[in-house]
Amino acid sequence: ENNATSEQGKLLRRVGVTSEMIMPLTARGRTVGTITFRHSGNRRFGQHDVQLAEELAVRAALAVDNARLFHQAQEAFLRREESLALLGTILSSAPIGIAFFDRNMTVARINDALVLGPEAASAVGARIESALPFPPRATLERLPCRRATRPRPVAFEVPAAALPEERRPWPDRGSPAL
């Protein structure tokens, strides 16, 4: 018996503790701590007390683990929000057209540089063919199907003539006046 345990035992006896149980707090295969039950007086813990302590330990462990999981979920949500904000900034400031499509090939996110008609927000939810009228049919046929497990990016060029003059690349607008 080490000195610390001996001192602790003396202190417990001095305050009248006659029985003690220490139960592990285990939830989902992880031990998250312990819970201690102490009793003073002539009564000692019996089998019924042990069963009750075990049940309390299980419930307490689940509460602690749920709090941990909730905290992790909140952190993940905040990281997601930060990522979406960064994506929004990149999309709005990108000089090239960028669009993200869901599994049904409807527009999930799109920037103004890619939209020919009204603003980008009105294209969200539209099918690719109506949101982007210029992809060649061969490009549309190469797009991943609904059951694609690993979507691949598909690149295509927009003919400069399909763009309004203010969105055309500089060389297509003629040489600058010197």
Image (spheres, helix red, strand yellow):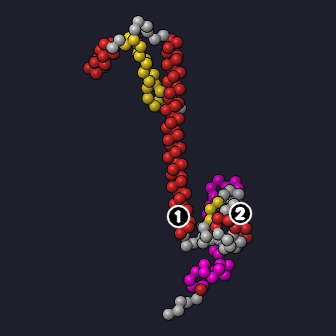
Residue density around tag 2, few if under 14, some if 14–19, many if 20 or more, within 10 Å:
some
Report the magenta stretch's main SS: loop
Residue 62 drawn in magenta = no
**Residue under circle 2?**
126
| Lower sequence index among marks 2 and 1 | 1
The span shown in magenta is 146-172
- Mark 2: which amino acid? Ala
Residue visible at 55% across and 90% down in the picture: 175
Q: Is residue 31 visible?
A: yes
**Residue under circle 1?**
89
The percent position of residue 128, horizontal first and vertical second, equals 70, 65
The quadrant of the image that shows the N terminus is top left
Q: State left or right for residue 165 relative to residue 74.
A: right
Compute the Cα span from label 2 to label 1.
22 Å
The percent position of residue 123, horizontal first and vertical second, equals 68, 65
42, above or below 115, in the image: above
Look at the numbered disc 1 and give the secondary structure of its residue: helix
